[in-house]
Image (cartoon, rainbow, N blue to C red):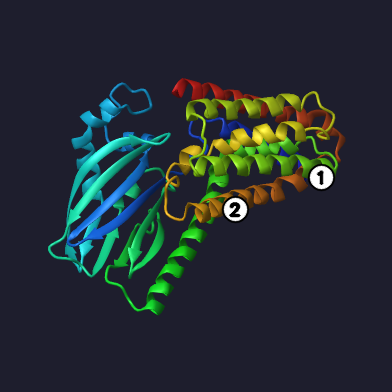
Amino acid sequence: MRALLRALFCLALGAAAWLSAPGAWAHEVGLSRGDYRVSGAVVMADLVFARKEVAGLVPGLDGDMSGGLSPEEVSAGRAAIGRRVVPNITVRGDGAPCIGALDDARLVEEDGLALVLTFTCPASPRRLEVALPVIGELATGHRHIAAATSAGKPVGHVLSRSSNSFALDVAPATPAAGGAAGTDGARSSFADLLWLGVEHVALGYDHVVFLFGLVLLGGSWRALLAMLGTFTFGHCLAVSLAALGVFAPNARVIGPAIGLTIAYVGLENWFLRDAEKRWRIALPFGLVHGFGFAGALSGLAGAQGIGVKVVAFNLGLELGQMAVLAVVLPVVLLARQQDWFKRVGVKALSAAIVAAGLFWFALRVAAG
């Protein structure tokens, strides 16, 4: 058993070093939304993407290399945006291609870029097929929330690289058929957003490191539950506020702040004997980490059925956290039964956590 724990200890140190690599960014799974409407032979698509993703998609759009976009840059690069985006979104009406055009591009919300596209079909379609191969050009794991009306009923679809298209029946169907279509769409959207939340935790390496540092000192079950419960409450509250568009701090502040919370927990592990009173920092730190998902949630604000989407995404986040803790916590509690781990292991791992937190802080400050 001692040999196994030492091997796990070495593995954890190696993981901490790898997570400090420049590529180990957190919460990079992108999210966008689209509202699709049909009027005669014209299909209108109101899309919202994260500015950072569009800047990466269109070379030269971020002219001053600031890491953001200004209204002037969007206006000057409108034609370039159209050339990159419009051909990568296809609409077919009754099997015939519809001609697309970019009507507008403007900055919206905290970090969003709104694009208004129109697709003109040869005739008023009864059935539409919409595909977004552009998703393959965006961040790995990107999700697109599509809202439309199918057979007279509102439906939602969550698209990804592997499933980047959906179909709509424009003409109303019978009440029974229409109701089934709406129910299936809602179920699919909820399940996909729940899984998206799980993915965000799995790919949010800084979030995983923070949780590991939080429980590294161990403690009584009462103290651990109080700490994790308070952190979860703050995390859920921040995610909800950001998703609903009520409040979301600037990402340029939250990104470095998350790095500091990680460094602080690692440093505190050197001086605290146990985590009995650590619940006091869990709430504010939970808020900080929850707001770290605001960039990903920019695609949810204003989306159809926003309340259900927030619940699904939040539930996925918490399920992801529980899965991480289900693996990490038993190992930590078992390791803390070894004297060598309490003397050397905790401090060595905490030093690695401090280094990772400070690295992320510096990297995100430099990135602006």
Give me the residue at 87% from left, 34% from top.
339
Q: Report crowding for label 1: few under 14, some 14 to 19, many 20 or more residues within 10 A (C-alpha).
A: few
Q: Report crowding for label 2: few under 14, some 14 to 19, many 20 or more residues within 10 A (C-alpha).
A: some
- Left or right, residue 300 beside residue 151: right
Q: Quadrant of the C terminus?
A: top left
Residue in the foreground of this view, choosing between 278 and 160: 278
Q: Can residue 273 be seen in this view?
A: yes
Q: SS for tag 2?
A: helix
Mark on residue 315?
2
- Is label 1 or label 2 in front? 2
Amino acid type, label 2: Leu
**264 is higher (above) or lower (below) than 210:** above
Q: Can residue 60 be seen in this view?
A: no
Amino acid type, label 1: Leu
Q: List the residue tagged with mark 1.
A: 334
Residue in the foreground of this view, choosing between 189 and 30: 189
Who comes first in sequence, dot 1 or dot 2?
Answer: 2
Mark 1 vs mark 2, CA separation in Å? 29 Å
Q: Where is residue 172 in the image (x, y as percent from the top left)?
A: 30, 72
- Left or right, residue 25 beside residue 154: right
**220 is higher (above) or lower (below) than 267:** below
Q: Where is residue 241 in the image (x, y as percent from the top left)?
A: 55, 41
Give me the residue at 38% from left, 59% from top.
163
- Splitting the image into 4 quarters, where does residue 337 fall? top right
**90 is higher (above) or lower (below) than 365:** below
- Splitting the image into 4 quarters, where does residue 155 fall? bottom left
Q: Where is residue 311 in the image (x, y as percent from the top left)?
A: 56, 53
Q: SS for tag 1?
A: helix
- Left or right, residue 115 beside residue 13: left
Q: Where is residue 317 in the image (x, y as percent from the top left)?
A: 59, 48
Give me the residue at 55% from left, 25% from top.
256
Give me the residue at 76% from left, 28% from top.
269
